[in-house]
Amino acid sequence: HPEQGTELAGFTAKVKEAAFTPLLTYITVETEPKTGATESDDPLDVAAPLLQSLKLVDGNGTVLFAEKGGMEEYDGKKAHFVFPYIENLPESLFLAPFD
């Protein structure tokens, strides 16, 4: 859900933007360090591994594109995800971590 933050290990993440086009699906996630994080808690070290594990899932937890991780870029503040076109858009979509 856009603008709804999720507390994760060392940071908060929230979907800032989602665009569904006839070719691709684009999702931008903003990250913020948790309160009490120090300057030595580099977001690239803390958030990047978890963000790289995120898969796009529907409201039932079914992974939509198991073969594609999705994250294309992370600059320490925003992660950009790109997924293939979704022909039948589910009622709910989530980014969920998978190993």
Image: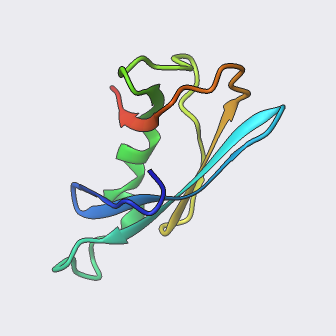
Q: Which of 73 and 15 lies nearest the eye of the viewer?
A: 15
In this picture, residue 42 sits left or right of residue 25: left
For the C terminus, the image quarter is top left
Q: How is the image coloured?
A: rainbow
Residue 70: x %, y % from top left: 58, 36
The quadrant in which residue 75 appears is bottom right
Q: Residue at x 35, y 28 (%)?
A: 98
Relative to 53, does residue 44 appear above or below in the rendering? below
Q: Which of 90 and 27 lies nearest the eye of the viewer?
A: 90
Residue 1: x %, y % from top left: 44, 50
Residue furthest to the left in view is: 36
Residue 12: x %, y % from top left: 31, 63
In this picture, residue 23 sits left or right of residue 64: right
Q: Which of 42 and 5 lies nearest the eye of the viewer?
A: 5
Q: Residue at x 62, y 26 (%)?
A: 89
Q: Residue at x 42, y 52 (%)?
A: 48
In this picture, residue 67 sits left or right of residue 53: right
In this picture, residue 87 sits left or right of residue 78: right
Residue furthest to the front in view is: 91
Q: Residue at x 37, y 71 (%)?
A: 32
Q: In this figure, what is the number of numbered marks?
A: 0
The quadrant in which residue 61 appears is top left
Relative to 71, does residue 37 appear above or below in the rendering? below
